[in-house]
Image: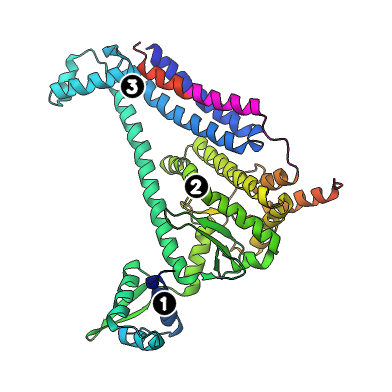
Amino acid sequence: MVSAALLATIASGCLIAAARLRRAEWPLRGPYVAVVAWQALGLAWGVSTIGALLAFGLAPYGRGVFGGLVALVTDAATHNLVLSELAGTPFGATQVAAVFAALALTLVLFWGLVVSFVQVLRTRRRHRELLALVARDDPEVPGARVLDHPAAAAYCLPGVLRSQVVISAGALAVLDRHELAAVLAHEHAHLRQRHDLVLLPFSSLKRAFPNVGVVATSYKAVALLIEMCADDQARRVRSAKELAMALMRFGSAGSAQVPAGALAVKGDDQPEVVARVSRLLNPSAELSWAATAAVLSSAAVLMCTTLWLWHLPM
Amino acid sequence: MNRLGDLERAVMDVLWERNEPLTVREVGRALSDRDLAHTTVMTVLDRLAKKGVVDRTREGRAWRYRPAASREGYVSELMFDALGQTGDRDAALAAFVRSMSGPEAEALRRALAEDDDQPRT
């Protein structure tokens, strides 16, 4: 029961920490470190919630979560998987329910991940096929494909063998040569660092739990941090001002030409693009070495503690 | 681009240009400068039909093919994907910036205007 209580504490602690992380200011100064923090919180939340349910449900075995699971499987096998036989063991109804809840949560999380991954692959394949039919190459923009559409858009399509950067004619019309180079540098950073894979677990969680507020907000936070990571990479080769101007031009071009009504309704937070622009124009000092080390070691301690509690036979 | 992809594109261009359902032979004739075998054109049209970008209808002993949507329709579909307006397509693509609402664009202009007011260092 001790481990169940501790794991439950960690699970709720993760939620509190996520809420604080979302409001914190330091992620703007160290987006890479902040992404690691989000990953650690998400993973620790899942492992500790499932662990807490199992630790509570399997407590009668007195062997901790891992030992309890092994004992449960052995039990089920020796009773030929007739679970009614287990009624003879000292399990209460709430404990059986807790074990089932843990299994259900595990399944939902994995299933969400798999479904999301398949959907993403399908969307990308369709997108790639259509792109091959309607996009053109432009000698002015080497390394990118051009879509003839008046709205401004620039994006990357990640692929295993062949990733592509796509830019619309509307974007080419509003960007000057330097701004275009900054945008392309940003997109190539996404592809080089496989940011899509970082975002995938968060987007699949969002798909699995569309109505859970904390899931949606953490997805948004990570998506924004990833854009900032790519901005930082682009800033190494192009000036921050060029990138900020490019963002602004997309803003003014997009609002005029994208069909109204299709736009997502946003909360009254500071718009994400404004956060990016002000960060580019008024850069604050990068996260210090000590702060980076503190965040990374907290993430490591969090993961180790959670896993260790799975072994605690109490 | 590989040869097959190049051919698919050329065939679609023909179908989009000629505003009527075409047979394999007619498509081949329109691409006569490429000197394609009948079976090659058939294979390409078959692949396009499997991808769902051309529809085919039987007329006598021959199939007639026509685009499932206009070129503009496909370009719009891609742009909608890119601008993140199709709902569940997050993480499939990474757009430089999602489409902005009017107030967002306004807030952005304000942010840049404030920056311009500050003295340059």
Please name the residue that numbered disc 3 is placed on.
A54
Determine the residue positioned at 32% across, 23% down: A98
Residue B67 seen in render? yes
Image marks 3 and 1: residues in contact by CB distance under 8 Å:
no
Q: Which residues are magenta?
A: A282-302
Q: What secondary structure do most residues of the magenta stretch adopt?
A: helix
Badge number at residue A194 = 2
- Image spot of residue A219 (x, y percent): 52, 41
Task: Please tell me whether residue B114 belongs to the stretch shown in magenta.
Answer: no
Under mark 1, the amino acid is: Met
Please name the residue that numbered disc 1 is placed on.
B12
Left/right of residue B67 with respect to residue A144 in the rendered view: left
Classed neighbour count for the residue bearing mark 1: other residues with Cα under 10 Å, few (<14), some (14–19), many (≥20): many
Kindly report the distance in space between the C-alpha atoms of the residues bearing marks 3 and 2: 35 Å
Looking at the rendered structure, the number of numbered marks drawn on it comes to 3
Under mark 3, the amino acid is: Leu
Badge number at residue A248 = none
Q: Secondary structure at mark 3?
A: helix
Q: Are marks 3 and 2 on the same chain?
A: yes
Left/right of residue A32 with respect to residue B2 in the rendered view: right
